[in-house]
Amino acid sequence: MSETVKHSLMFAFVGVLIILDGTTSFGIFAGSWNSALGILNMGLVSAIMALGVNLQWGFAGLFNVGIMGFTALGGLAVVLVSSSPTPGAWSQGGIGIIMALILGALTVVAAVFITKNMTKGKPRVLALTALLIAGFFAYRAVFDPAVSGVEAINPALYGSLGGLGLPVLLAWPAGGLLAAGAAWLIGKTALGLRSDYLAIATLGIAEIIIAIMKNEDWLSRGVKNVVGLPRPMRKEIVLQEDPGFLDTAASLGLDPVVASTLYVKITYSLLFTVVLLALLWMAQMGLKSPWGRMMRAIRDNEVAAEAMGKNVTRRHLQIFVLGSAICGVAGAMMTTLDGQLTPGTYNPLRFTFLIWVMVVVGGSGNNFGAVLGGIFIWFFWIKVEPMGAGLINFVTYGLAEDSALKLHLLDSTAHMRLFTMGLILLLVLRFSPRGLIPEK
Amino acid sequence: MDLLNALVALTNYVMIPAVAYGSQLALGALGVTMIYAVLRFSNFAHGDTMAFGTMVTILVTWWMQSMGINLGPLPTALLALPFGILGCMALLLFTDRVVYRFYREQKAKPVIFVMVSLGVMFMMNGLVRFIIGPGDQRFSDGERFIVSARDFKAMTGLREGLAFKTSQGITIITAVVVVAALFWFLNRTRTGKSMRAYSDNEDLALLSGINPERVVMYTWMIVAGLATIAGVLYGLDKSFKPFTYFQLLLPIFAAAIVGGLGNPIGAIAGGFVIAFSEVSITYAWKKILRYLMPENLEPDGLVQLLSTDYKFAVSFVILLIVLLFKPTGLFKGKSV
């Protein structure tokens, strides 16, 4: 069996799993197209994230443990770009906030300027300290009143700057840009040092991005969440009142409510597939180009690549920013799919480490592997819980219905997920480190 | 009088919490740094190792409480601590045997080790949540305070109270004892010396007949002890929640790197640097300034540089500064 046939069969297998989830309710399958399409949509988003991580890890050997942060920035972009502007927010303090941010940025730029242009010694340390302290207080002096101004506007409904009211599709590239900016900042400091440092720095930035999104209410309402984000297609309720749509649904023999939800989900699937294919095509082209060969050469032997005149740190920075931008796009897509931004739900185990499992299982260094891993592991992640419950019911078959042990175990099945994912990661790393679809 | 009040408030709200938290971080960072020195990778599972050791201790504590065994004014957890350490040792030696040893024999790159430790982290996290659940657990008992704020006020007649919790006292004493024992072990005993030799120069150590597997085994055992003690102390001082322990990973790594990865003295110094910056930057200084400034200059706001929600940002910014200017850390750690 040739490689291509084998790999196509794996994709077909995942496709069959999803179709089975839509058609039969035997065992772990839900038997509803709603659930199947839900899994498919998140699987597609996960596949895009895996593609971004694969770019960093598979092509360049960079270890990014902050995927959650970049994903969350993508979600933030959706709010900032597409939610409707809060009436009066700009006059109440929006301008002040922007001014304060500019002031903060100027302080940092000035600090960098001082570091670069003054000679080492006490005067430089003194000048830097004075500048940073003065800059910080000036920033707080402008920032604090502006923020309370914005947050005072009808906090139950708004209390934030709101967005620009632009079409939501524009938020996807904006999410990529936002994530790219954060990645540049991190890459600039941590790249060029030993590999663990990048890992630790990305772990930190992710936590901080989430902390900012939870606490800065003026930005995206913090833990009060932003709900009802606009969608790229008509809402279910609108569809259910459209006579044309109702006729089509009736002619297909579908209930209008079911038909409208399916319509929305299928539209998302199509949109996501288009983005995924475009990114996959770009990644493949990149891999085959001289640039991709250079990247792999750097990954396999940095010293040799440096001897050939390649600037390793710069290339690493480039691919780190690109990969993170893809995660940002995926994050924006995910928030669009959910229709809400809930900073409280971002959890590193789900948004960072799960993506790593996808990349490793799929096959690091192979773009198709990342896509396969993304969809397959997502399916698995959703289904581990029913599987775990089934397993525990089977194991504790002999125990009484109300035995404390059995109840405790059944309560804990939700945590089986983490355990299983860790186990899968370790097993794949040990016995098949090249993954399902190995690098060519 | 005002100056005294200010001093008491400073000790009560900044110094004591920071010293206690710093000791906990230092013990955690020592574990990370030991692994780095001997096994040469950053162990991402360290936070969850702490959680596991603490969990075993909590379970034994609950059992002891139910049997009526206690230490009087001291928390029962101290009695249960050796069992927690033993449980943690068993787990770490088991993971080393079934997971890490394979990659050691392969001479895999450090980044592979880091990734493997991610998998281990996942499993330990799942295990802890599976056994004890994801919620908050309290297990401290005994006397709550060594000096309570009210007694202190009655004693001195000052307006400010000074509270010194038992858990804080225990933390500080335990940390001193553990660190002293660790340094004695590393500098004076044969095994400790062979560990340092192995860490400094692997090939030379092998040449002089040091058994690497033995060194690795002792390292894991010491790390299990350090992690469990750090975890139990943190849990007694605050409370036990698996996710919090995972989040401790960031300040612990920051402490280890700030001090210089692989350098035990650096890890301790780093722990205190991080703890003091975190506490003093997120503390609202208004209370103290009120005593020190003339009345007309009293600050309006809380004079809090950053809200407590950003305490992770503090360790992170310190980490970035160190990486930018002195990547080997304050005390010279292993090469970059």
Image (cartoon, rainbow, N blue to C red):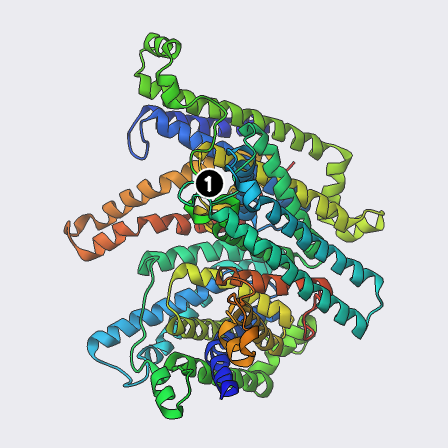
Query: Helix or strand or loop: what does disc 1 sit on?
Result: loop
Front-lying residue, B286 or A409 = B286
| Disc 1: CA contacts within 10 A as few (<14), some (14-19) or many (>=20) | many
How far across and down, in percent of the image, does residue A90 sit?
57, 41
Res. B221 visible in picture: yes
Tell me residue A95's x, y (percent). 61, 45
Q: Quadrant of residue A14?
A: top left
- Residue marked by disc 1: A341
Please tell me which residue is depicted at 32% across the width and 61% down the height of the picture: B132
Instruction: Give the x, y percent position of residue B174.
Output: 45, 83
From the viewer's perspective, tell me whether residue A278 is left or right of residue B65: right
Q: What's the residue at 66%, 56% (across, down)? A: A195
Whole-percent x and y of residue B125?
41, 57
Image vertical order of residue A272 relative to residue A396, above or below: above
Say if B129 sits above or below A231 in the image.
below
Q: Quadrant of the C terminus of chain B?
A: bottom right
